[in-house]
Image (spheres, rainbow, N blue to C red):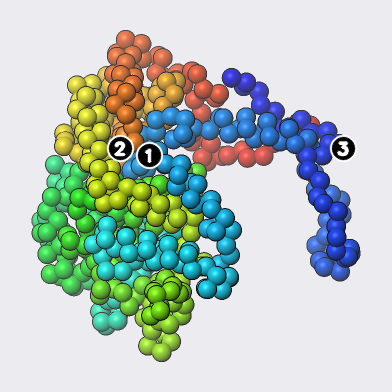
Amino acid sequence: MNQELPLIFEIASPGRIAYSLPECDVPDVPMESLIPADLLRGEPAALPEVYEVDVIRHYTALSKRNFGVDNGFYPLGSCTMKYNPKINEDVARYPGFAKIHPYQPEESVQGALELMFRLQEDLKGITGMDAVSLQPAAGAHGEWTGLMMIRAYHESRGECRTKVIVPDSSHGTNPASASVAGFRTVTIPSTPSGLVDLEALQAAVGADTAALMLTNPNTLGLFETQIAEIADIVHGAGGLLYYDGANSNAIMGITRPGDMGFDVVHLNLHKTMSTPHGGGGPGAGPVGVKNLLIPFLPEPRIVQTETGGYAISAGYNRRGEDGGSSIGRVKAFYGNFGILVRAYAYIRSLGPEGLRQVSENAVLNANYMMHRLAPYYEMPYPGPCKHEFVMSGSGLGEYGIRTLDVAKRLLDFGYHPPTIYFPLNVPECMMIEPTETESKQTLDGFIDVMIAIAEEARTNPDILLTAPHNTLVTRLDETGAARKPVLNCTCG
Ligand SMILES: *Cc1c(COP(=O)(O)O)cnc(C)c1O
């Protein structure tokens, strides 16, 4: 591999041109008449002057340095880095979806509105909820949207409820979202078997409880078996139940948060439903609610008209106007539309049976891997697990090896490491999510490497301590990179 990829500035040379704009066919207007003179540049921007072929080669070379689901196994727990069928990408690129504008008149975008309406209906069916908003742009955004609705609900009843309860096995975004929505969070511990401690929950709920946020399966990969009791305790105290459904890959088509008694749920379409993610976006975190929260849903929503067409319900229910109660808009326009198209194509191409099979295979793959790795790594919560499991590298401590070293060594074998050091309640944690889209060969290949690494830890720990060896850069100073990043370069 070519280690020395020059900067595009370093291959530039004055006078080279990659692209020429067509001749201007409208009257030339002096720039000064359009933009205030003090905002105009004195001299041209220092852009690299290169040929088209240089641009293509430069960015293609950069793209090959990326690791993605399309070039390797990516068992990053909690992130559901599964393979995304390309047909869903094709559909999202149809010009009728990709080239419309949100300001177009409703009658000219009926197809897009119908797709969003149908997706709302499908997500209602998948979650068991009474209504869905597609606006939130991420899981955490969905959480915040749900909590703002919960807040508006309690306020509308004249109740002052300030606390949100989160088990310590919930996803880290849960307490963060609760805090941003203006609540105080109360963390309750898990039992030794990794489930919500009902006694601790009972002791924590009270007249000030606004909601409980439950991640299920929880971050240990376990299904919360006492959900009916949890729901009774929280509802009995007048609180609402929030379901973090970001990881639906184990339950979709099998069970539904709505049937378990939850009042709000969000899904991560960019995990479960066919959007490649990582690197920060875009995503979609639709929220589903039960009837009692419908008045508080974000506006606008996509609705069906009496004549069978589709419309945008903008502004009929704004809070503070004519007795409206909606929490308002949470995202420009209608959410990340391209993600919604992919999700709709995904759901429709699999159908109810296919979605169930996804969950069953995701769970099967995780349990297979957990079972085969159990003799070599510590399993603090021996299965069965759902779509992912946690194991610990603490058994390698006697050879001076940490989980970080195992993760770095995996890079040498061409694998993306699993999530490490999360969840926080498992020392030297590795959180592995194989997903349903991987074959047995792929799973076995990874398992064999993990076993070989455990063996290396015993016989040749140095090779782990100095890993990775086959990558473009070797081990980075991660603290330095995070605390004192050097993000510019001086070209000479
Ligand atoms: C990924 C995840 C989230 C957050 O989703 P974002 O889209 O990254 O904001 C929340 N909860 C769980 C359980 C998750 O796995």
Cα separation, mark 1 vs mark 3, equals: 45 Å
Cα separation, mark 2 vs mark 1, equals: 7 Å
Residue matched to label 3: 15
Residue matched to label 2: 436
Q: Residue at x 38, y 27 (%)?
A: 407
Q: Position of residue 6 (x, y in %)?
A: 70, 28
Cα separation, mark 2 vs mark 3, equals: 52 Å
Q: Is residue 351 above or below residue 439?
A: below
Relative horizontal placement of residue 44, taking residue 143 as reference (left or right): right
Q: Is residue 259 above or below residue 69?
A: below
In which quarter of the view is residue 388 placed? top left
Residue matched to label 1: 82
Q: Position of residue 173 (x, y in %)?
A: 36, 53
Q: Position of residue 109 (x, y in %)?
A: 52, 67
Q: Residue at x 83, y 56 (%)?
A: 41
Labelled pair 2, 3 in contact (Cβ < 8 Å): no
Q: Residue at x 76, y 30 (%)?
A: 11
Labelled pair 2, 1 in contact (Cβ < 8 Å): yes
- Residue placed furthest toward the top: 459
Amino acid under disc 3: Gly
Q: Quadrant of the C terminus?
A: top right
Neighbour tally class for label 1: few under 14, some 14-19, many 20 plus, Cα within 10 Å: many
